[in-house]
Amino acid sequence: MTWSTGLAGLTAGLLIAVVTAPVGVSGAVFLLPVQLSVLGVPSPAVTPTNLLYNVVAGPGALLRHHREGLLHSALTRRLVAGTLPGVVIGAVVRVFAVPGATAFRLLVAALLMPLGLWFIGRTIRPTRPTPDAEPSPRTVTGLALVVGVVGGIYGIGGGSILGPVLVGRGMPVARVAPASLASTFATSVAGAAAFALLSLTGSGDIAPDWHLGLACGLGGLVGGYLGACLRPRLPETALRLLLGVLATTLGALYAVQSLR
């Protein structure tokens, strides 16, 4: 990694986190397209490199939730119990079943487009929290397992997808956010480690780009703090619509590129 690439990763992580942190979205969702198309991280190493972003950028918010006593919940345990094995399965699938850039771009499109449309829809018509909205424990753990696999393939951890799904079912954001963040951090650590181990048994660009991942993560750590400080002054509705349109547009572009 050259110093210019590291600086670009640091800047990208910072700017993305400033925009995504105020609306409770993981910056990893939008950082991966930057690593893939701008920074030129090879496939499949782009996935664990993106997971490193969560590992470095996440502890600040995680510590805040811990001090407020919000992490020690049954929901947190269920999400972590499901996403941890899921992300390891996802890493194996990514390395051996979807190693090429073309197929991966199609998978990125399949995630970004529905996520972007979901953001737009929930911003225009928000869901009201309901006290009986939480699925059964078995359903939560099973959903976490599936989402962990997807997160391991994409490189965003499991909580980045689980959070919107559970909030979309009507669960309060204040309860979902800490559990989702804990799940994202735990699966990102496990996922990055799984890719590092898989790189010892295979050939090609499998191991994460440690320097770039750490640079992006440091940018995300600073950007997340700034975003949290600026949150009262930023238009949350406009930011959600912007991120929704951006995710949908990026997904559509990747779909077109992969189908050519």
Image: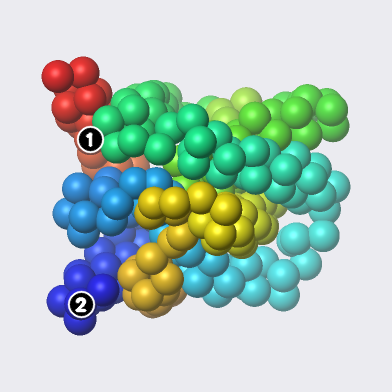
- Left or right: residue 4 versus residue 54 is left
- Left or right: residue 9 versus residue 24 is left
Image height check: is 203 above or below 215?
Answer: above
- Left or right: residue 184 versus residue 208 is right
Q: Give neighbour class at mark 1: few <14, some 14-19, many 20+ (Cα, 10 Å).
A: some
Image height check: is 194 above or below 173?
Answer: below
Image height check: is 73 above or below 131?
Answer: below
- Left or right: residue 191 versus residue 76 is left
Which residue is depicted at the point 34% across and 46% down? 43
| Relative image position of residue 62 (x, y in whole percent) | 62, 67
Is residue 65 something one can see in this rendering?
Answer: yes
Image height check: is 194 above or below 112?
Answer: below
Which residue is depicted at the point 75% across and 60% down? 71
| Relative image position of residue 245 (x, y in whole percent) | 24, 34
Name the residue beneath numbered marker 1: 250
Q: CA distance from mark 2 to mark 1?
A: 27 Å
Which residue is depicted at the point 77% across and 67% down? 69
Q: Residue furthest bottom?
A: 3
- Of labels 2 and 1, the one closer to you: 2
The image quadrant that residue 106 belongs to is top left
Is 220 or 215 nearer to us in this picture? 215
Going by the numbered disc 2, the residue's amino acid type is Thr
Going by the numbered disc 1, the residue's amino acid type is Leu
Determine whether the residue tagged by mark 2 lies in a helix, strand or loop. Answer: loop
Residue 2, label in figure: 2
Is 127 or 56 nearer to us in this picture? 56
| Relative image position of residue 156 (x, y in whole percent) | 48, 48
Q: Give neighbour class at mark 2: few <14, some 14-19, many 20+ (Cα, 10 Å).
A: few
Which quadrant, please, contains the C terminus? top left
Dot 2 or dot 1: first in sequence order is 2
